[in-house]
Image: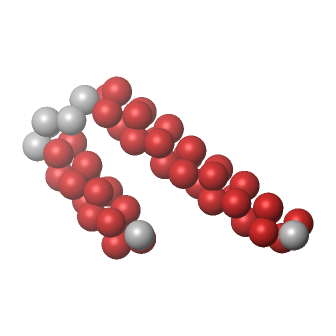
Amino acid sequence: MNDSLAALASQLVAAEAAGEASTPAWVFGLVAFGILIGLLIFTLMIRVDR
């Protein structure tokens, strides 16, 4: 999964450098990344509680 995230990040950087990506795309990406990290932490907490 880390490889796909790295590939997505490099595509976003390339798109921004080419002037193809807009600021809302970056905001959406950061929010989606934050949600994924939150779900990961939440899942790990549930496993620890059991």
Q: Is residue 22 left or right of residue 49?
A: left
User: 16 or 11, which is in the foreground?
Assistant: 11
Q: Is residue 14 left or right of residue 3?
A: left
Q: Is residue 9 left or right of residue 50?
A: left
Count up the numbered dots.
Answer: 0
23 shown above or below 8:
above
User: 1 or 30, which is in the foreground?
Assistant: 1
Residue 40's spot in the image, x, y percent? 63, 59
Residue 6's spot in the image, x, y percent? 34, 66
User: 22 or 44, which is in the foreground?
Assistant: 44
11 shown above or below 3:
above
Q: Which quadrant of the figure has residue 1?
A: bottom left
**Residue at position x 54%, y 51% from top?**
36
Residue 43's spot in the image, x, y percent? 70, 60
**Residue lying furthest front:** 50
Q: Which quadrant of the figure has residue 50?
A: bottom right
User: 28 or 13, which is in the foreground?
Assistant: 28
**Residue at position x 40%, y 34% from top?**
28
**Residue at position x 64%, y 50% from top?**
38
Q: Which quadrant of the figure has residue 5?
A: bottom left
Q: Tell me how the rendering is colored.
A: secondary structure
